[in-house]
Image (cartoon, rainbow, N blue to C red):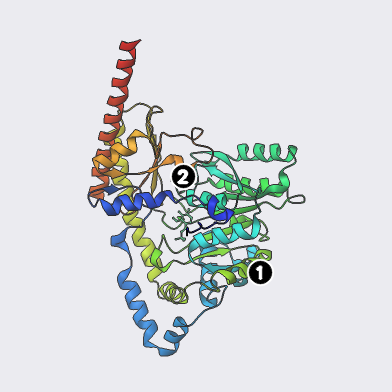
Amino acid sequence: MGLASFSFSGRSNRTPESPISYFMEQAIENPNLISLAAGLVDTDSLPVKAVADTMARLFADPQTGKAALQYGTTQGYTLLREKILQHVCNLDGVKPEQLNLTAQDVVVSTGSQQLLYLLSEILLDPGDIVITEAPSYFVYHSVLASGDVRVLTVPMDEEGMQTEELARLLEQLDRAGELHRVKLLYVVDYFQNPSGRSLSPERRKELLNIVRRYQDRQRILILEDAAYRELRFEGDDWRSIKSHDTGNEFVIYAGTFSKPCAPGLKTGYALLPSELIEPLLRLKGNHDFGSNNLSQYVLNALIENGAYHEQVRYLAGVYRQKRDAMLEALEREFSDLPGTHWTSPRGGMFVWLTLPEDINAGPSGKLLKECIREGVIYVPGEFGHVGKPGTRPTNEARLSYGDASIEKIHEGIKRLRRAVETVRRGEKKKERVAVAAS
Ligand SMILES: Cc1ncc(COP(=O)(O)O)c(C=O)c1O
């Protein structure tokens, strides 16, 4: 007798395979491959000693140790929530009262990824609209795809999302009678994944002004994903969009301890309008009724004993050196190639490389195959764009200096250039054959 196949849910069928799993597999299968693809943080900088000492101290007191090993609350450890609130307000130079915020408006999550997911679940129905930057964080696109949500995009320039274009898009949607479907505006406004760009201070305020224009008819929330904010190694820290939302009405600020501390602790958080807390916690209750309690105790202690802030300061130096190495290597290898340019991030861990238009750097293009042969890998920029294949730019790449050593960054960019040359020679040869045949 045969065995009937499973019938998966619509959500499951709509959820695309993570493009990153392919890159992880490649890196594991081929240890000589230099990965400029993985979004991993710098392994050598992970705060092993600080976490070991902090944990030893936590467990030296049996009461605290037991509390940390017990279930926590769905919303998160109160002392940590208080510290998070103070921490974000300190970054912004404001007091929580000025933003109408208390620790009751803070939720701790299993990484900020869980937060992005849960927020989408409580706010979005199939057919609703989320507006993002182009390019944007592709894992979030995948969350939206699984919920059958429409993603519309606004182009970026060196100052981040082009707010004039956003205003135009919203006017268009309003005229088309679709304003009521626009629920979220998603921006990664500090050293964006994937482009490395940040949203300028003027545009931060402008974004809020734009959503306020519609406030009596449609509450459009801004989801400010500040995942890379603290990995800043150059320039001033720009105030968050949240810091301008004085009534706590329009902006959800999502942060994480993964990038500035340790992704293994998998702890993120959000500061959000009070009306969202209850529905969010009901859903989170169904998911896990609380994130890893031990991680929350460890983070609370790391902030309290100063080790967290020390780590953030230390990381800034490490990532600056790695950014410098990548920019030097790009300058050396690519400055003679017309049509090529790249971003110069002032924080975070990504550089966005744009190649000449005739070079297909997409997942099924020649460059990626050639790169794997040369022993280097990047994330095709195509993943950061939405729309059907064929409509997305294919000549872009996300290059990460997160985990690769300085030597590997130099060697990786050298290999990338060699791969580009091989692909270009191949294209020229094809052209010559075509001319000869015509
Ligand atoms: C822009 C952005 N947001 C959110 C996340 C989620 O990180 P985590 O769940 O580890 O906090 C990431 C991870 O790479 C990211 O790049």
Position in image of residue 280 (x %, y %) = 62, 66
Question: 286 or 254, which lies in front?
Answer: 286
Location of residue 155 in the rendering, given as x and y in whole percent from the top left corner: 54, 38
The residue type indicated by label 2 comes to: Arg
- Dot 2: what SS? loop
SS state under label 1: helix
| Residue 197, numbered label | 2
Is 249 situated left or right of 85 in this image?
right
Front residue of this view, candidates 318 and 429? 429
Q: Name the image quarter holding residue 342.
A: top left
Tag 1 residue: 278
Q: Identify the residue shown where x is 40% and y is 88%.
A: 61
Can see residue 438?
yes
371 with respect to 63 (left or right)? left
Task: Give the residue at the far front of this rendering.
Answer: 1
Residue displayed at 46% across by 52% down: 236
Q: Callout 1, which amino acid?
A: Glu
Instruction: List x then y, in percent, for residue 136.
Output: 50, 45
Residue found at the very far bottom of the displayed protein: 62
Compared to residue 124, the image places residue 99 above or below, namely below
Tell me if 51 is positioned left or right of 222 in this view. Answer: left
Checking the image for residue 228, the label placed there is none
**N-term-proximal mark, 2 vs 1:** 2
* x then y, percent, for residue 437: 32, 11
Dividing the picture into quadrants, the one containing residue 425 is top left
